[in-house]
Image: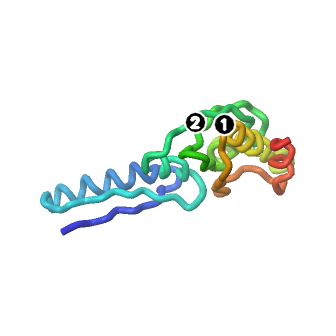
Amino acid sequence: MRIVLAPDKFKGTLTAVQVADALAVGIRAAAPDTLIDTLPVADGGDGTVDAFLRLGWSGAAVEAPDSLGMLRTSVFAVRGEAAVLEMASVCGLALTPEAQRDGLRATSLGLGHAVRAAVQRGARHVVIGLGGSASTDGGAGFLQGLG
């Protein structure tokens, strides 16, 4: 028998990779002869870049402000002239401690900085996963970050 495991994350507990690996361990324990393919997926939020990296894309680090302006390093995926970024890893809700969440000033500025960095590295095709955002500026910060 062959099984394909293609889970998304268990938000707040396990990444999609961790879910797939845990399921595979359980299946192998119950049916050791089973062929298992793990293909973690994402819905555009947390884990989107990780899914591309797992498919063999390269990672590139970028430093950009999070939703409250603190500089953070995140990673985007690159292959040829294509780049995949996720808003969640730049200015995401999971990066913002609950006590510091501020809907009146949460910005998408860092995503603009990250996209600009990807283009400066040679990306001509940019895909942005918008899930998991902490920003509330309707993309105004993103446009400002692009320059």
- The spot of residue 86 in percent (x, y) is 63, 49
Along the viewing direction, whichever of 21 and 10 lies nearer the viewer: 21
Q: Nearer the viewer, mark 1 or mark 2?
A: 1
Q: CA distance from mark 1 to mark 2?
A: 9 Å
Kindly identify the residue that appears in the image at 77 percent across and 44 percent down: 112
Precedes in sequence: disc 1 or disc 2: 2
Along the viewing direction, whichever of 142 and 80 lies nearer the viewer: 80
What residue sits right under mark 1 in the picture? 121
What residue sits right under mark 2 in the picture? 60
Callout 1, which amino acid?
Arg
Establish if 101 lies above or below 128: above
Judge the density around disc 2: few (<14), some (14-19), many (≥20) Cα neighbours within 10 Å.
Answer: some
Residue situated furthest left in the rendering: 33
Kindly identify the residue that appears in the image at 59 percent across and 42 percent down: 76
Kindly identify the residue that appears in the image at 56 percent across and 45 percent down: 80
- The spot of residue 93 in percent (x, y) is 67, 48
Element on which disc 1 rests:
loop
